[in-house]
Image (cartoon, rainbow, N blue to C red):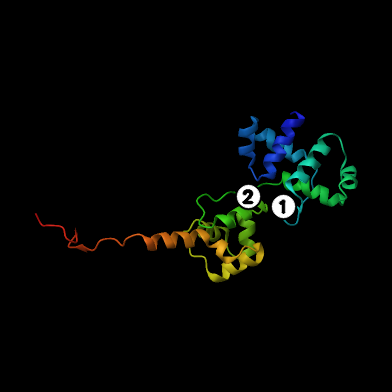
């Protein structure tokens, strides 16, 4: 794997791409990409959120590491603690959360993805099962005020943004004409023959 290919993998990982998506884009097998990420220096993390660094800074750390800099050298050069440097590489190496497709709450699911949570881990933060949380995100179950309030507290996303898609869908349904009344199985005003 070349230096540029390694940086490409890290760049895509920073953007939140899955191992499979990265493998497809860079032309390696899933196993090769996963193996590369697992070989990055890392430590077990207590919180699975994105490190407090810009994408550019994370990519610079990767570039310097691939050029031969040690963790202690990186920490000194970037004025970081060694544990914080390891945290950046751990973020790249750890398993990414599954994606919710067709989410009723895209801003929320985007926040979850960008902050490195799995659906199960975020559901645990909320005190509900992952199955229930998945059903809420897909619009199959109602999101109670209590759950929305916990989400707002954890993510700092305002209610108006959490519910933006739901509000937009509600407004569009109010704008359309109501369905025609039916009379004995026939549209109102339809002739008998």
Q: What secondary structure is marked by label 1?
A: loop
How packed mark 1 is, by other alpha carbons closer than 10 Å (few <14, some 14-19, many 20 or more), is: some
Q: What residue is shown with label 1? A: 50
Above or below, 188 against 9 in this view is below
Question: Which residue is depicted at the point 86% across and 35% down?
Answer: 68
Q: Considering depth in this image, is 32 or 26 the residue closer to the camera?
A: 26
Which of the pair 110/24 is nearer the observer? 110
Please give the residue where the numbered disc 2 appears in the rendered image. Answer: 97
Between circles 1 and 2, the one closer to the viewer is: 1
Q: Quadrant of the C terminus?
A: bottom left
Image position of 21 (left or right of 56): left
> Where does residue 81 sit, x and y in percent of width and height?
87, 52
Residue at image coords 69%, 35%: 33
- Rendered location of residue 130, percent (x, y): 57, 58
Q: Tell me if residue 21 comes above or below residue 118 in the rendering.
A: above
- In the rendered image, residue 142, in percent from the top left (x then y), is placed at 48, 65
Give residue 150's mark: none
């Amino acid at each position: 794997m070349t230096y540029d290919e390694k940086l490409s993998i890290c760049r895509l990982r920073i953007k939140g791409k899955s191992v499979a998506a990265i493998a497809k884009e860079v032309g390696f097998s899933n196993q090769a990409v996963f193996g590369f990420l697992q070989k990055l220096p890392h430590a077990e993390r207590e919180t699975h959120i994105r490190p407090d660094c810009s994408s550019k800074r994370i990519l610079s750390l990767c570039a310097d590491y691939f050029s031969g800099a040690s963790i202690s050298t990186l920490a000194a050069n970037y004025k970081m603690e060694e544990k914080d440097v390891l945290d950046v590489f751990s973020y790249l190496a750890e398993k990414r959360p599954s994606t919710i497709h067709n989410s009723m709450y895209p801003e929320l699911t985007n926040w979850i993805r960008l902050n490195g949570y799995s659906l199960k881990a975020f559901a645990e933060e909320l005190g509900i099962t992952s199955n229930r949380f998945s059903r809420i995100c897909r619009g199959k179950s109602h999101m109670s005020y209590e759950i929305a309030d916990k989400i707002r507290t954890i993510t700092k996303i305002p209610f108006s943004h959490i519910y933006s898609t739901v509000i937009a869908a509600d407004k569009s349904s109010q704008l359309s004409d109501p369905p025609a009344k039916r009379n004995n199985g026939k549209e109102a005003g339809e002739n008998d023959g």
